[in-house]
Amino acid sequence: MNIRQLRRLPSANCRWTAKRKLQVLKAIDAELLSRTTALSYYRLSAEELDEWRALYESLGFRALYAKNCNATRKQQLLCGTRDRIAASLPIGDPAR
């Protein structure tokens, strides 16, 4: 990524697309944008940025589409809820 590409980074009030998410990740990787600056400028949480990175690294560009990010979040929430319920059951409970 060069200085011309840095100028093409998304504005702070943009709608997030897969392409824009990838641009930010690549700018951070190329050290044209620090992680801290990206978090504050784009008003992202560290968890959100980490989620983008994990999705991109494990599943590729198409995983950054909003519907895929939302599906991943929903699955994580469902699994987390199921695990919390299972942990609250007594050990000898036949429901386990």
Image: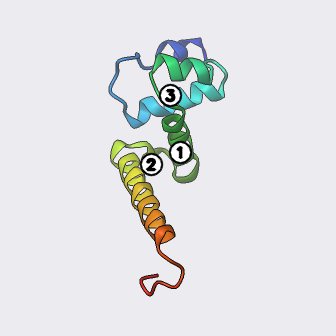
Looking at this view, is 79 or 94 the one in front?
Answer: 94
Say which residue appears at 47% left-offset and 63% top-offset.
84
Q: Is residue 48 left or right of residue 13?
A: right
Q: Is residue 1 visible?
A: no
Which residue does the image show at 42% across and 53% down from the upper left? Answer: 72
Label ID, residue 23 = 3
Q: x, y (%) of residue 31? A: 67, 21
* Residue 14 higher or lower than 46, as above or below: above
Q: Tell which circle, 1 or 2, labels the residue nearer the N-terminal end.
A: 1
Whether residue 3 is visible: yes
Q: Earlier in the sequence, mark 2 or mark 3?
A: 3
Relative to the observer, which residue lies in front, 34 or 18? 34
Vertical arrangement, residue 73 with respect to residue 79, above or below: above
Quadrant of the snapshot with the N terminus = top right
- Helix or strand or loop: what does disc 2 sit on? helix
Cβ–Cβ below 8 Å for labels 2 and 3? no
The residue that mark 1 highlights is 56
User: Could you say whether the residue bearing mark 1 is in a helix, strand or loop?
Assistant: helix
- In the image, taking residue 17 as reference, residue 89 lies left or right, namely right
Q: Residue 63, percent across and down?
A: 44, 48
Q: Are marks 3 and 1 in contact (CB under 8 Å)?
A: no
Camera-nearest residue between 85 and 34: 85
User: In the rendering, which numbered label is found on residue 63?
Assistant: 2
Q: Is 87 displayed left or right of 73 in the figure? A: right
Q: In the rendered structure, which amino acid carries the disc numbered 2?
A: Ala
The CA distance from mark 2 to mark 3 is 14 Å
Q: Position of residue 8 (x, y in %)?
A: 46, 16
* Figure check: 94 above or below 23: below
Q: Nearer the viewer, residue 11 or 81?
A: 81
Does dot 3 land on a helix, a strand or a loop? helix
Question: Quick check: marks 1 and 2 in contact, CB under 8 Å?
Answer: yes
| Dot 2 alpha-carbon crowd within 10 angstroms: few under 14, some 14 to 19, many 20 or more | many
